[in-house]
Amino acid sequence: MSARRKSAESMSAPPLILASGSKVRAMLLTHAGLEFSVRDSGVDEDAVKRGFTGGNDEAGTDALALELAAAKAQAVSKVAPGAFVIGADQILSCDQARFDKPRDMGEARDNLKIFRGRMHILHSGIVLAKSGELLWSFSDRALLTMRDFSDAFLDWYLETLGEKVRTSVGCYQLEGPGIQLFEKIDGDYFTILGLPLLPLLAELRRHGVIRT
């Protein structure tokens, strides 16, 4: 009986799609109890970045994160009419320079040396789209300050994590040894993970996608 009730409830709710290949974002939605599917947007993120006309300041980086999130959500929503599509993106900036995921371990080491003893910002943008139309957007920032760790610690960290450091733009996961890199963190935990979850859940409730 409970399985039938669950099936009926799922059929009555509008379909929800995550336009992202991020395992972390999918995990957050799953742990929050949402039913959704995942679809790759196929968006050329480098092309979006090259065409971006905003500035390199913090507001400009917020706007770029939203533009990337919107491109993903709209691309998927155009081929999935009737579905609510979540698009999200995150950019790291440090002294107005923007960073991507490291291409190799050497670049990971170089980036961590740049971040060492300094504050960087994680800019997270999220949008909700339906049938190619943007319904809602939200951006948030988290400020993270790395301690002035030693070269010996950096060697240990990279040896311990290996290629895992290349899976995130900042070369860390706070739920693992990456927390040892930091002396101060200001911001929402879900924003740091790349999916500002509470505002998203509120918007999904407003559209009847999840229970109020």
Image (cartoon, grey):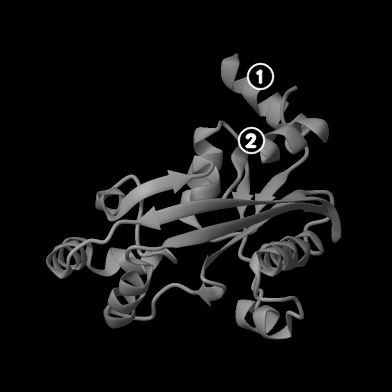
Q: Is residue 67 left or right of residue 89?
A: right
Q: Quadrant of residue 15?
A: top right
Question: In the rendered image, which quarter contains the N terminus?
Answer: top right
Mark sitting on residue 78: none
Give neighbour class at mark 1: few <14, some 14-19, many 20+ (Cα, 10 Å). few
Mark sitting on residue 5: 1
Residue type at numbered disc 1: Arg
Image height of 155 relative to 5, above or below? below
Q: Which comes sooner in the sequence, label 2 or label 1? A: 1
Q: Position of residue 191 (x, y in %)?
A: 55, 47
Residue type at numbered disc 2: Leu
> Element under label 1?
helix
**Circle 2 residue:** 198
User: Does residue 35 appear in the picture of this structure?
Assistant: no
Q: Is residue 162 left or right of residue 137?
A: left
Q: Quadrant of residue 104?
A: bottom left
In this view, the residue in front, 43 or 168, is 168
Residue at 53% x, 58% y: name it: 122
Q: Is residue 48 left or right of residue 94?
A: right
The residue most toward the top is 1
Q: Position of residue 84 (x, y in %)?
A: 77, 48
Residue at 67% x, 85% y: name it: 50
